Amino acid sequence: MRKAVFIFALLIIVSCKHEQNTSWFNAAKAGEYFSIVREICDSDNGKLWGENLFGPVMYVDGRSRTLYANVPDKEGLLRERDGVYSGILPKERIITNNVIEFGGVKYAMVPLPENEDRYRIVTRTVHSLFHSFQDRHDLKPSTISTRHLNEKNARLYLKLEWKALTNAIKSSGEPRNQAIRDALVFRGARRELFPTAITDENKFENFEGLTTFTYIKLCTSGPDEIRTRILEYLDRIYQNNSYAFGYGFVNGALYATLLNDKDFDFRQIRTQDFDLGKAVLDAYGVTLPAVCRDVAGSLAFNYDIQAIRAEESERDAMINEYTRRIVATYNEKPVVTITMESPNFSFEPEDIDYLDTLGTLYQKLRVSDNWGKLAVDKGGALITNDLRTLRVSAKDLLIERNHISGDGWHLVLNDGWKSIQTENGSYTISRQ
């Protein structure tokens, strides 16, 4: 596995346990949201991307796995009532805010929140519908690796780029042009340090960043609210300890917002690695130095580089302390170890902590693989940097046939797999 498996499926609320339905959602409510989203897509009617984004949609209750769709499947798995098609999503299928093939139809899947939140549900729906658009037009990458964004210099340049982009979005005229040039200088300096990552950065910004921009643009009242929502999202991502799995969602949206202000024709984007930064450079007539790193250092003082360095030093100290505790939990105490073969991951960028050579700790996580499905709701799961080994704490371990649970997590094993006790109370998951 040369690159990180790329299924950046955000907003996941699945559970392995069969529980009661989400009380506020039913077929009638699903019908209401189908109508709301159709009206939003019909209002745009292809002006942004050249075609109406509305299509097959599936809302899924993560607790009961009840699903509600707006069109029938081709295999007769769903039952119709009052124009809404309902059924149960099989336990082996992962719930994600992305495209899913079910009964011979590709649906835009939308996980339901525990409580009704109209903006959240509508934007999730448009989010997934745009991924369906990307899927139809071969704009969905199979693999992406942006782990270089955990490197110190990459984070410094990225934070400087974000500060300059914030200034650009908040300003106009010459101040905006200058801020855009500064942002592109910082972007260029980072890419000069990590040239082999340029294509993957572009793919990430296109796949998720353009998705963020699209649902915000279609679900807001105009340019002012677009800018407000984008910058609020940036504030959340900025606080993350790792940018490898989150930066693309906001970075692509920031550049798309600047392009939108220039009436850029987004329909011309027909490749997975379209360079949004280059498009902004052309749209605003920016000229960059031959070597961006030659001037990035002096520009950095205009963006409070000392404060950024202090933030990064605090992050390093936190990671060091965190790492000591993680070593104790996952190397010195009983754990359950799973070797991953062909995993699908679902998580939120805010829920991960990069721990250098130890790997990445996911506070909340959903994984499906050949061995079954794992849901981690608290306590975390540690995954090595090569994405081959996953560990969860064996505290409060309970094994009941193919159901295994611990403190904050639950695992359902597929047929042909079992848990094997090793030493010191630890277990591994292996084929029978």
Image (cartoon, rainbow, N blue to C red):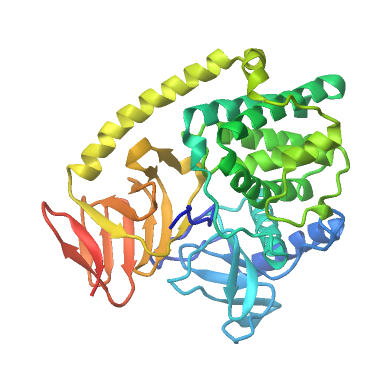
**275 in relation to 67, above or below:** above
Identify the residue shown where x is 44% and y is 66%.
Answer: 20
Pick the quarter of the image with the N terminus. bottom left
Residue 376 location, x and y as percent? 37, 53
* Residue 168 in the figure: left or right of residue 46: left
* Residue 176 in the figure: left or right of residue 429: right
**356 in relation to 25, above or below:** above
Which residue occupies the extreme left position in the image?
Answer: 424
* Residue 328 in the figure: left or right of residue 199: left
Pick the quarter of the image with the C terminus. bottom left
**178 in relation to 199, above or below:** above
Residue 162 visible? The answer is no
Residue 379 location, x and y as percent? 32, 45
Identify the residue shown where x is 85% and y is 20%.
Answer: 174
Identify the residue shown where x is 39% and y is 50%.
Answer: 386
Residue 32 location, x and y as percent? 71, 64
Q: How many labels sit on residues?
A: 0
Residue 188 location, x and y as percent? 66, 31
Q: Nearer the viewer, residue 155 or 406?
A: 155
Q: Nearer the viewer, residue 172 or 389?
A: 389
Residue 60 visible? The answer is yes
